């Protein structure tokens, strides 16, 4: 794989001159991670900036008894561990949700490039601001919203992100979806069944077929779900 | 008040040369906010960077029916709205917990200073990284920890932050504490009563006297509270 051709399309590196881009491409280390394998542990030291080339990675926290909360899911072109430049240890763990290929940039090279080209710092600030906004939205969701509303919001956002109208290919088991919306697998299953009975969606394995986007929108915004005969 | 003398002691502006510091001090607008008043609303536009001179401000999300979750509490010397440079709208609302004095820096002046002195971007990146870590810790707390553990962690952190051994002056009502740890006022009251009966702390109005820091440490780390006769 040609690292340079990957970097050219990454918003985080937008505006960097060719020589700095080559320095980054030259220092990048490739890493393959199988689905279910850890990329790094929570509170692990000195990791550098990560970039998903293909596949998907979740950032998560776990409790001693094994429960988990997913905080972010990152796909192709998305950087993670943006705090690598400023923090010695990772604020959470990272695990591959699918077979994943990652590029890894040592913090010291990133810092040297940023010193020459502060636009990289601005881009990192932009990316970190978005992460902070997303984490604030998750806090709002966990503390102030019920499970159906969280699930509906997740489904509507997924449609928006993938630019699709009527189907979401999860590509991971339902138990991973439960960790994203902060529910037990049993509760998620119950809510999905209810939404299916209400004619809002249809489950086809790991694919969720959306039957009423307006209905889901309404629930996502905190409204009452439409009646079961709708 | 001399804005320049305030700025000299703020870590966010550390390393800035005197001329840039004077530009920032010159553009800063002072704002007084009474306890309970909004500093800005959720999703409000173009606000600039805020700095607490004295008093305290909470950043929070609220649900339509009035429930609230506090995300951050900022005191003297702490900046907020760090996303002002990169995001058009605020990701949450801000309200004064006490009578508060704020300095406000327009985003465009901040951007001009950062263009000359990229160290400001690095300092902002550092501050945003910490906020992100704090918000991830809150997500972990809300989704994976029970109320007594959250409360114990809050108390232990407060002791650490204030460099104190045995008393925490909340300076705000218990209902605000409930919004910080993500509990109803009734649940908080019940947990505080239980901790008081267990000899861990003593309530004196808005002051919490800590009787057993090791006991609270244990609960904060997810251990069982000591028995009531301890």
Image (spheres, coloured by chain):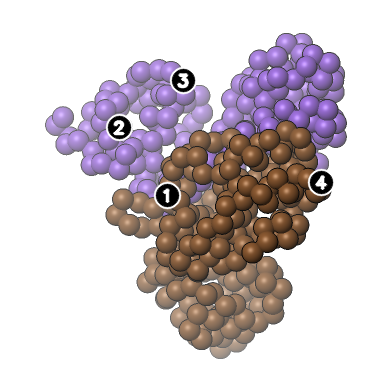
Chain colours: A brown, B purple
Q: Could you tell me which secondary element the residue under label 1 belongs to?
A: loop
Q: Is residue B171 above or below residue A141?
A: above
Mark 4 or 1, closer to the camera: 4
Spatial distance from mark 4 to mark 3, Cα to Cα?
46 Å
Which residue bears the numbered disc 3?
B162
What chain does mark 1 sit on? A
Look at 68% across and 68% down and name the residue there.
A161
Q: Could you tell me which secondary element the residue under label 4 belongs to?
A: loop
Spatial distance from mark 3 to mark 1, Cα to Cα?
31 Å
User: Would you say B190 lies left or right of A161 here?
Assistant: left
Q: Are marks 4 and 3 on the same chain?
A: no
- Quarter of the picture holding the N terminus of chain A: bottom right
- Asked which quadrant contains residue B73, the reply is top right
Mark 3 or 1, closer to the camera: 1
Spatial distance from mark 1 to mark 2, Cα to Cα?
27 Å
Cβ–Cβ below 8 Å for labels 1 and 2? no
User: Would you say B47 lies left or right of A162 here?
Assistant: right
Can residue B12 be seen at all in this image of the molecule? yes
Q: Could you tell me which secondary element the residue under label 3 belongs to?
A: helix
Q: Point out the residue furthest to the left here.
A: B229
Which residue bears the numbered disc 4?
A17
Q: Residue B222: where, in percent of width, then height? A: 30, 43
- Asked which quadrant contains residue A159, the reply is bottom right
- Quarter of the picture holding the C terminus of chain A: bottom right
Q: Is residue B20 above or below residue B63?
A: above
Mark 4 or 3, closer to the camera: 4
Look at 45% across and 51% down and name the residue there.
A40
Spatial distance from mark 2 to mark 4, Cα to Cα?
53 Å
Which residue bears the numbered disc 1?
A41
What chain does mark 4 sit on? A
Q: Residue A214: where, in percent of width, then height? A: 68, 77
What chain does mark 2 sit on? B
């Amino acid at each position: 794989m040609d690292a340079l051709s990957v970097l050219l399309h990454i918003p985080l590196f937008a505006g960097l001159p060719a020589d700095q881009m080559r320095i980054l491409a030259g220092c990048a280390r490739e890493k393959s991670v199988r689905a279910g394998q850890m990329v790094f542990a929570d509170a692990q030291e000195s990791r550098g900036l990560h970039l998903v080339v293909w596949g998907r990675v979740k950032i998560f926290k776990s409790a001693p008894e094994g429960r988990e909360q997913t905080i972010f899911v990152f796909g192709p072109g998305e950087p993670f561990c943006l705090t690598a430049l400023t923090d010695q240890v990772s604020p959470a763990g990272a695990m591959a949700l699918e077979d994943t290929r990652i590029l890894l940039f040592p913090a010291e090279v990133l810092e040297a490039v940023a010193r020459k080209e502060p636009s990289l710092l601005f881009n990192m600030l932009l990316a970190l601001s978005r992460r902070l906004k997303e984490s604030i939205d998750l806090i709002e969701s966990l503390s102030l919203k019920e499970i159906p509303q969280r699930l509906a919001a997740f489904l509507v956002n997924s449609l928006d992100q993938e630019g699709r109208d009527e189907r979401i290919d999860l590509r991971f088991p339902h138990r991973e979806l439960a960790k994203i919306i902060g529910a037990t697998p049993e509760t998620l299953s119950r809510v999905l069944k209810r939404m299916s009975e209400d004619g809002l969606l249809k489950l086809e394995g790991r694919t969720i077929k959306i039957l009423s986007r307006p209905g889901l929108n309404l629930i996502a915004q905190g409204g009452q779900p439409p009646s079961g005969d709708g």
